[in-house]
């Protein structure tokens, strides 16, 4: 993630930690673009910062990456979010 996003995530995680809300994992949105050939491109850099955050908060490998995908945007524009469409 970019520097500002990283700072925001740390602040949010600190806040939840202070009020004793468990953090069960980290989701990295728009983490990569998967090309038709199967190659993954990381337009915002690799996920080292995400893993650093996970280790900082004792989450180990509980990180997930969501790729950029045109269909997500297309469904949202039609009012039919991917998570609700079958």
Image (cartoon, helix red, strand yellow):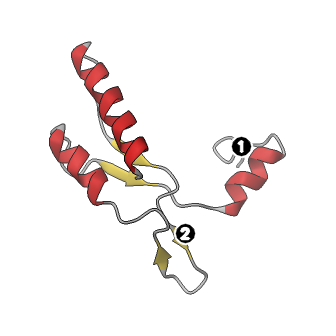
Instruction: Please rate how many residues cluster around mark 2, counting C-alpha atoms within 10 Å: few if below 14, some from 14 to 19, many from 20.
Output: some
Viewer-proximal residue among 22 and 51: 51
Q: Residues within 10 Å of mark 1 (few under 14, many from 20)?
A: some
State the residue lying farthest toward the right. Answer: 78
Residue 81: mark in rendering: 1
Pick the residue in front: 36 or 53. 53
The residue drawn where x is 16% and y is 41% is: 56
- Disc tally is 2
- The image shows residue 70 at horizontal and vertical percentages of 70, 62
Considering every residue shown, the one lying at the far top of the view is 19
Give x and y (percent) for residue 49.
Answer: 28, 53
Q: Nearer the viewer, mark 2 or mark 1?
A: 2
Instruction: Give above or below for 64 relative to 11.
Output: below
Pointer 2 or 1: first along the chain:
2
x, y percentage for residue 81?
Answer: 71, 43
Q: Which residue is mark 2?
A: 33
Q: Secondary structure at mark 2?
A: strand
| The image quarter in which residue 33 lies | bottom right
Q: Is residue 53 left or right of residue 69?
A: left
Q: Residue at x 78, y 54 (%)?
A: 74
Q: Residue at x 24, y 45 (%)?
A: 53
Q: Residue furthest bottom?
A: 37
- Residue 20 occupies quadrant: top left
Residue 69 vertical position relative to residue 18 in the rendered view, above or below: below
């Amino acid at each position: 993630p970019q520097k500002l996003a990283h700072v925001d995530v740390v602040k949010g995680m600190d806040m939840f930690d202070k009020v004793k809300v468990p953090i069960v994992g980290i989701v990295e949105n728009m983490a990569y673009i998967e090309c038709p050939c199967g190659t993954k491109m990381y337009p915002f850099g690799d996920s080292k910062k995400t893993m650093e955050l996970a280790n900082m908060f004792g989450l180990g490998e509980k990180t997930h990456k969501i790729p950029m995908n045109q269909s997500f945007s297309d469904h949202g524009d039609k009012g039919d979010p991917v998570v609700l469409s079958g």
